[in-house]
Amino acid sequence: MPEAASAPAATRAVIGDSEFDRDTAVVRRAPGVYDIDLSAGWTIINAVNGGYLLAVLGRALADALPHSDPFTISAHYLTASQPGPAVVRTDVVRTGRTLSTGQASLFQYDAEGREVERIRVLASYGDLDALPDDVRTTAKPPALPPMDQCFGPEDGPAPVSGSSAIADRLMLKLDPSTLGWALGAPSGKGEMRSWFGLADGRDADPFSLLLTVDALPPTAFEIGLKGWVPTVELTVHVRSRPAPGPLRVSITTRNLAGGFLEEDAEVWDSTDRLVAQSRQLARARLS
């Protein structure tokens, strides 16, 4: 495995006491109803990141359901969420011995005071620690250069103020072979690979994995497109509780057609275990 680095021990946050935990915490108002103030710290050009939103709804469902770990969660993004107050409403669809299923929606108010649904999810939860250790796979972790040979947002030009607040909260070290777009020479391959972590050093858990799959620059950049690539639908499979240490993320797009593209993501932990997979459908800005 390529050599990695991690945040100094003195600066590391812990699971349950980090900015991510505070910003995804929901407050139960009534059974199945939760309040949250969506943080502006997880925005891209003033729109709240879809992976952050998924973690918010994921935590609400963990409280509403008898099982605590997301196994699979599918989200449809209906309207763009904005920083500020929001309410999450959950419903228990079914409960069983090993899996429970629920649905949740996040709502905000528009300028006229009307309630608007932003995102709707359906998810199944279980206990990751109860899964058997047997692994049979042909999947392989991405071959990334050592972290000190990769590049993050801090290595590029200064961003436009307010354009990507989320970048300050992430540890991203991108594979140079997927950074042609940053130099004006995209490869056309639709690939993005990176070391990944939270900037405060908090280790990954199942809820931060929901953020991880949607936190890298869009693969559309390496196809030669520019601008925002809004998510239409995102499904995440959490396969294992991640070990401490930096993650490696690989995202690919093979097909852009009719103004839409898919992104397939794999997330690997420090023990070379595949801990999460996702697929999303996104709208491409062609002009």
Image (spheres, helix red, strand yellow):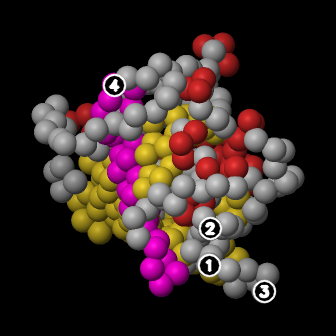
Q: Is residue 87 left or right of residue 158?
A: left
**Where, by quadrant of the figure, is residue 248 drawn?**
top left
* Label 2 Cα crowd, 10 Å radius (few <14 / some 14-19 / many 20+): some
- Examine the residues drawn in magenta and state their main secondary structure: strand
**Residue 234: image x %, image y %?**
44, 65
The count of marks equals 4
Give the residue number, with chain letter if any, for mark 1. Answer: 286
Which of label 3 and label 2 is nearer to you?
2
Q: CA distance from mark 3 to mark 2?
A: 35 Å
Give the residue number, with chain letter if any, for mark 4. Answer: 271
Q: Which mark is first along the chain, 4 or 1?
A: 4
Give the residue number, with chain letter if any, for mark 3. Answer: 112
Vertical comparison of 162 with 267: above or below: below
* Label 4 Cα crowd, 10 Å radius (few <14 / some 14-19 / many 20+): few
Image quadrant in which the N terminus is located: top left
Residue at horizontal 46%, vertical 73%? Answer: 256
Vertical comparison of 226 with 2: above or below: below
Q: CA distance from mark 3 to mark 4?
A: 51 Å
Query: Is residue 269 magenta-colored?
Result: yes
Label of residue 225 in the image: 2
Query: As shown in the figure, which amino acid type bears the numbered disc 3?
Result: Glu
* Label 3 Cα crowd, 10 Å radius (few <14 / some 14-19 / many 20+): few
Q: Residue furthest right?
A: 161
Label 3 residue SS: loop
Label 2 residue SS: loop
Tell me whether circle 2 and circle 1 mark residues in contact (CB < 8 Å): yes
Label 1 residue SS: loop
Q: CA distance from mark 2 to mark 1?
A: 7 Å
Q: CA distance from mark 4 to mark 2?
A: 34 Å
The stretch in magenta equals: 256-281
